[in-house]
Amino acid sequence: MSTDTTTETPKEYKVIGTRPIRHDGADKVTGKAVYTSDLHVPNMAFGAFIRSPHAHARIISVDTSDAENMPGVLATCTSADLPSLWDKGDNLGEGYVNYAHLSGNILARGKALYKGHAIAAVAATSTHLAEEAAKRIKVEYEPLLATTWVVDAMQKNAPLLHDKLITHTLDDEPAKPSNIAEHVRFEKGNIEEGFAAADVVIEREFKTSTIHQGYIESHVSVALWNEDGRLKIWTATQGSFATRQQVAAVLEMPVSQVTVTPCEIGGGFGGKISIYEQPVAAILSRKCGRPIKIAMRRDEVFEATGPTPGSFIRVKLGATKDGKLNAAEAWVAFDAGAYPGGFIAPGCMCALSCYDIPHATVDGFDVVLNKPKTQAYRAPGSTHVAFAVESVIDELATELKIDPIDFRLNNAAKEGTRRVDGPVYPRVGLVECLQAIQNSDHWKSPLTGPNRGRGVACGFWFNAGLKSSVAANVNADGTVTLIEGSTDIGGTRTSLAMQLAETLGINAEDVIPQVVDTDSVGFTDVTGGSRVTFATGLATYEAGLDIQRQLVKQAAKLWECDSEDITVTDGTYQTKDKSLSFKELAVQVSASNEPIVGRGAVDAPNASNAFGAHIVDLEVDPDTGKVTILRYTACQDAGKAIHPSYVEGQMQGGAVQGIGWALNEEYFYDDHGHMRNASFLDYRMPTCYDLPMIDTIIVEVANPDHPYGVRGVGEVPIVPPPPAIASAMHQATGIRFYELPMSPPKVWKAMMTKNTED
Amino acid sequence: MSTDTTTETPKEYKVIGTRPIRHDGADKVTGKAVYTSDLHVPNMAFGAFIRSPHAHARIISVDTSDAENMPGVLATCTSADLPSLWDKGDNLGEGYVNYAHLSGNILARGKALYKGHAIAAVAATSTHLAEEAAKRIKVEYEPLLATTWVVDAMQKNAPLLHDKLITHTLDDEPAKPSNIAEHVRFEKGNIEEGFAAADVVIEREFKTSTIHQGYIESHVSVALWNEDGRLKIWTATQGSFATRQQVAAVLEMPVSQVTVTPCEIGGGFGGKISIYEQPVAAILSRKCGRPIKIAMRRDEVFEATGPTPGSFIRVKLGATKDGKLNAAEAWVAFDAGAYPGGFIAPGCMCALSCYDIPHATVDGFDVVLNKPKTQAYRAPGSTHVAFAVESVIDELATELKIDPIDFRLNNAAKEGTRRVDGPVYPRVGLVECLQAIQNSDHWKSPLTGPNRGRGVACGFWFNAGLKSSVAANVNADGTVTLIEGSTDIGGTRTSLAMQLAETLGINAEDVIPQVVDTDSVGFTDVTGGSRVTFATGLATYEAGLDIQRQLVKQAAKLWECDSEDITVTDGTYQTKDKSLSFKELAVQVSASNEPIVGRGAVDAPNASNAFGAHIVDLEVDPDTGKVTILRYTACQDAGKAIHPSYVEGQMQGGAVQGIGWALNEEYFYDDHGHMRNASFLDYRMPTCYDLPMIDTIIVEVANPDHPYGVRGVGEVPIVPPPPAIASAMHQATGIRFYELPMSPPKVWKAMMTKNTED
């Protein structure tokens, strides 16, 4: 069931808010969409990696000679083929990237920092030959002590990963090497006074596991390094320009020498922003003069690409008897994996972001340890902190005997609320979301029966703006081609085409969107941060206005009048006595005028501030600890839902991933720092067989920074599920869970313990 | 030897006029450039045609059932699968295209009109299987009388090709079906008075053969008709948008439903504008749901794609004793092939275009007959008429005992000359070309020895303008990507990149040109008519100015000043106290501004009027009639040579093709209307083993319609060789040749006859 709740007087739109068939739909359902794996480039050869069997080891030597002597082997590659790049880096849209770390993660330099860390690669005439040859690369290791738990890694005597890593501490201690890569601190008001004035104070500790984005498509790339120095890369990526930038940086070449063609992408969720195999394929190609394809196996994806951090979080909240939050303290440690992660700052920014709290501090630590380098995963950092903060919020509400939605409404962030990290909110929609779930059929329907519980929780993501470029060309049949650099993960071809159609007053079907390579469109930041429909949408809107201006000029020539005499309303161009639709006019003028070429480029404002609120009903099997989700409703402020089905799809997909975090997903490490469940058989993700339909409520509080009010919707829905489920499980079992995942063994054990104690 | 003669005070350029390495050079010399044959689209299958063994036959029945029953056969296609389109048509840049004729030429409807006319096609899982299956398609024919000579086809009792073809006559005769598709007539002054006032009048008749463009790459296409109705075509074409338009028209779908990706092209010369196999591949794809590749064999290319017309021409010129041309009459019949050709008008426009003649008429006839439908071939029509007119000019000069260059200079068209078909020339460069060859080392060097002769001749092509669109994006490293719709045949990636570089004040290497598909750039007419460097160059110049405006704005923001305070000179942006190069500035502003996206679109003026003049020295072997070219100099007004090497390349290539026309090339037909030399073994084209280096002289008389003076250079150089060679052979042998090719058997026979007569 989907209910659209529009909370402000809606503008009248002709295209926006409708649900046309997606432009790439047929390609996707017929199997004609071309993924990198489908690519066959003439004369192509294949690459494979050899990876570290140790979680932490010094690399004594790498001997590729046996591999190179195998018939059919074309080239090998080690970190010696990559330039050393210490201290170089750049901001790639979703955070700063240190290129030395990026390079070291691509091929280990001196030390292997996690099991699965790539050591060397080989190219051969077939994939199987390349895999066999990779096994013949002899690597001599000196194993070192390893650590895979964030709190352990922070200890002074912890095995040190990087000799040169100096903590960016905020205190006065002399800087020295440690595993702490970054310490961020935000504060507001006076935390001591805040807690002193509180009637109830609750402090709890939380743990979350390493969790992978679990995209269906593995990482696959083809690279062709031409004799003139130009490098072509075909790959699945969330950002063709980010890939271009990273590949160019790691190989120390100008960005314009690299062309990245983004193929279709089988899921990313933040995990397909960083590069891995691309520069290796490039070097192998340069060495043997042939295009090289490298495709990761699933175990490589788990062990050597970037999951979300595991974390340890301590949260202390204080409230007055009348249910007003007065003070909050959060201490957050994220494991970054083998190299600094960069997600501690957004995590800390989101920690207390749903509430208006006068006194607060947040301390965050980014900690390296012997796991794969973490990467963005849908609202990176926000889900971790929400699990902690929203759980304590629920405990406070329970303690104060206030309805959990009322308690949140009492304290909800709204226009004018200053966040602990500084920004003051403009118009935002959290209150409207809470009201929407309070008024929902779900909340109003009683939940009965044993072992059942209901929980609610909020979620926040600030949403990115960043740069986007588009071009748009008017065809002789009155349709418009839209050329964009934003790779399409969640239906953005259509959400952008619809905005152009709305701007021009034509049908969504009359816009033909194309995602093109980095040489064929202006710079565009990553598809991530919930930014595309918002920011590339802005660029698309600009391109529409640009087309309209040109068409008015040509109409004036056709009608022999001044441009000023022509008015344009909903795609109708008229003078006092003449009137033509966009399509009619475009057809008429096309023969006798220069082609109409529109363009739009923006550096869009960051922070369109999206909020959501979820309700979950569940039942816990007392015999096994297995949790069954009975009913789930996700509500979110989309600003404006361009294509409601895709907004709902994002909400449903995000909620399901959040449910996976809550109930099942985790990297299971043994004592040697080896992941023991690196396959989809053993790494348990929820599927459609596990869950009911996720109901959705779209709230629309227009974003004032976008002509159609768009905020962006992708990130928020992953955030509320873990705390909502934890609260529901408390209701069902009487037990508070402070550790993710709340998987059957843990739940069963907790219930057994409780039964014994009772 | 190449001598650049600049005839006007040159502007100072930094990039234009230099010779950078071509941007696609490495791709071409390493074999990495992707031609359609190299393409492998997932799940691809293959198509083959069955073609008419008769030059003219009624098709009684086509039975595809045996073919369809073969294992591995996926689909068949006949003309019944194509909509009937009588009387629909469009102007496609290089002339009007009648879609019924186009469709009929793709798959014969009712009658086969020439040997090789496609009757049906079949798709199968391999090329060989498709070819075998095509043989099992049973076609029952009723053979009809055929004609392959233009004058025969014009007779009242000639076999009629089209029942519905009504001549567009200019006289008052009642219109009735005939093989005469078009009669054009131009006149100027009073022709009777003109000849009456002439002291010398010479009238001659000329014949030219059917000649193929002889591009190395065959016609190859891949089509994928998706279930959502969108059709993708990959093909080698001179015009991706022309292909889109034709395919859409023939299949009766909107242009925007068709995407054409132009692959690299292995030669076109006018012959890769029309479509052939594309709609058939599309229909087969729609029927079987798989991408279909069709590649023509060489015999199919000769017998079923469009060569240049064979022709019969009568020319009568009158001059006064002092060497002034006073009257000219030309009667021109072009064989159009099986469907109206469309090249008679340009042929007639070019016939007398080199001279200022007060009294003149030109009558032209476009005649259908049982040969493949003719297509454009480099200056279409101009070479035929130049052979005739320039030969008579030479005879007149000889008769009047005036030096042939002086005679031409006496009468040369110049600014203000009105052409017989109407236009009055603006500034043109024929006089400068004639002066340049008169002053050349070649002309000044005496030619001695027996059986040797020297000839000169002029040539003209009006050059097209038409529509072009480009986009250009500034990269973060200060380079610029140029996106164009003009397929690159002769180095136009570079000639356009150089114009953008000149406009922006950067290096040619700092522009990265890309030819993209029809969805990824604005409408752009064909690469043909010598228009790309001129017209797409204009669009590129506009895009450069557009970028400059945006960069000035961002510089003003950077320097906190007004845009008006910034001056731009040769790519240096400066205020009173600040100065940065384009590249430095672009790098600085890229981080903190919206991306810079430039665009340019033009509907460029037609007729940039290009002239050339050639000298040839040759020797005729008295024993065999074989002609050896001893020395050849081609001179041409390029307006401005952007990349002189490519201008020289065009001049050399065109001259060599013209030499092929003059000496060897012809479709050799037997009495059944069957071409008997449909292979490169039997169809004799000149190669580098046959010819000396072609010397070039570039004259630069700036075109006032282009900021850098470009005129376009591709067409003209094919025009002068046949008459120049005919005149040289007259000098060598004492014999005037009036028929092309002047091949060894003909020359030997003529010499034997002359020797007998002498």
Image: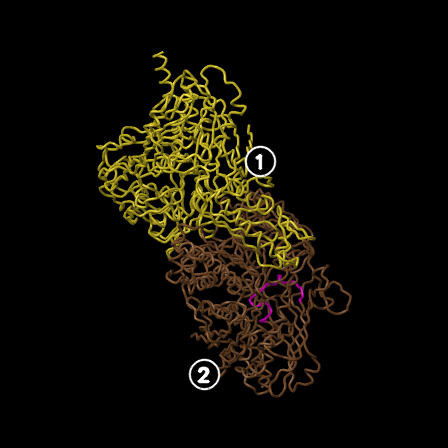
Chain colours: A yellow, B brown
Q: Which residue corresponds to mark 1?
A: A9
Q: Chain of mark 2?
A: B
Residue A325's spot in the image, x, y percent? 40, 26
Distance between the alpha carbons at the discs numbered 2 and 1: 89 Å
- B370 drawn magenta: yes
Q: Nearer the viewer, mark 2 or mark 1?
A: 1
Q: Residues within 10 Å of mark 2 (few under 14, many from 20)?
A: few
- Residue A187 in percent (x, y) is at 34, 34
Residues at circles 2 and 1 in contact by the CB criterion of under 8 Å? no
Q: Which mark is residue B445?
A: 2
Q: Residue at x 69, y 64 (%)?
A: B181
At 41% from the left edge and 15% from the top edge, which residue is drawn?
Answer: A623
Q: Nearer the viewer, residue B198 or A150?
A: A150
Can you say which quadrant of the picture contains the C terminus of chain B?
Answer: bottom right
* Residue drawn 30% across the image and 28% down it: A670
Foreground residue, B247 or B662?
B247
Q: Amino acid at mark 2?
A: Ser
Region of the chain picked out in magenta, as a range: B366-383
Kindly indicate the quadrant of the structure image that contains residue B502: bottom left
Please tell me whether the stretch drawn in magenta is mainly helix, strand or loop. loop
Disc 1 residue type (three-letter): Thr
